[in-house]
Amino acid sequence: MNKSKSISVIIPVYNGERYIAEAIESVLAQEYLNIEIIVVNDGSTDGTEAVLRSYRDVRYIYQPKQGASSARNSGIRYSSGEFLAFLDADDFWTKDKLKMQTSLLRARPDLDMVFGHVEQFYSPELEASLRGRIKLASGRMPGYVPGAMLIKKAAFLSVGFFDDGFRIGEFIDWYMRAVDFGLKSCLAPEVVLKRRLHDANTGIMERDSRKDYLRVLKASLARRRKGEQKAEAPGK
């Protein structure tokens, strides 16, 4: 194994004591081994830190609570890999996720990032009454989410960091910026991410922040209009 790790895996966590070990174990079980794991504790008040301290192969970073975007950005700043991968603390990967996506990126130099498919599941402790309120999509879904992506670090930095002004919708904002910037991606057919549905999912708990999605769309439209105006300007 090279001293420098080719993939930096970044896991933001806030009060993830119940699930963080399963997420980390899914990274350690990867068939692709040349990785570094960076876990950013975003101000947890439960037993998350004790769980993380038990892993010698994990780089542990603590910061006061600032949100998942800020935590991911902190992990990126500490990363040393050629590629970046992200995993939420309550989800986990299939074992060949990194091997498959790395092989695809190396075989296709034109690509900047690779996505895979996602399968959702109810967390075992979720009460039946809540399962009726949280919709579970059946089968695999295209995974345009951080946990299903592998990206060249240089490509990510060319677009810029996640906007930590968003409480939700930050990845949609980043992805739209990446598309506007011209990054190339593909969607692999394999399932790479198992997404847990439970009573503390960010999208459920942060319902009041869903106006962030509108801000994301407005920002993307503004960028495109600006680009069109530059293209139409005389003498350009």
Image: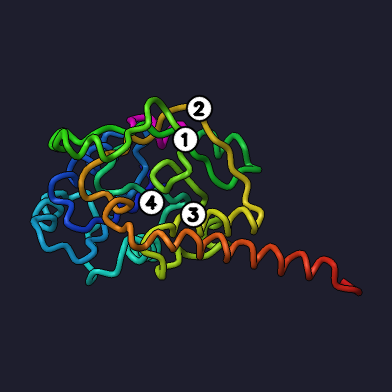
Residue 152 highlighted magenta (yes or no): no
The kind of residue tagged 3 is: Ile
The C terminus sits in image quarter: bottom right
Quickly name the residue at label 2: 189
Quickly name the residue at label 3: 172
Q: Earlier in the sequence, mark 4 or mark 2?
A: 4
Residue depicted at x 78% and y 69% = 229
Q: Circle 2 sits in a helix, a strand or a loop, which is it?
A: strand
Q: Circle 3 sits in a helix, a strand or a loop, which is it?
A: helix
The N terminus sits in image quarter: top left
Quickly name the residue at label 1: 116
Where does the image place residue 215, in percent across and percent down from the top left? 50, 65
Measured in 3D between alpha carbons, the distance from the residue under mark 3 to the one under mark 2, in whole angstroms, is: 21 Å
Q: Nearer the viewer, mark 4 or mark 2?
A: 2
**How many neighbours does mark 3 have within 10 angstroms: few (below 14), some (14-19), or many (20 or more)?**
some
Measured in 3D between alpha carbons, the distance from the residue under mark 4 to the one under mark 3, in whole angstroms, is: 21 Å
Left or right? Give the position of 199 relative to 103.
Answer: left
Q: Are marks 1 and 4 in contact (CB under 8 Å)?
A: no
Q: What's the magenta region?
A: 93-102
Measured in 3D between alpha carbons, the distance from the residue under mark 4 to the one under mark 2, in whole angstroms, is: 23 Å
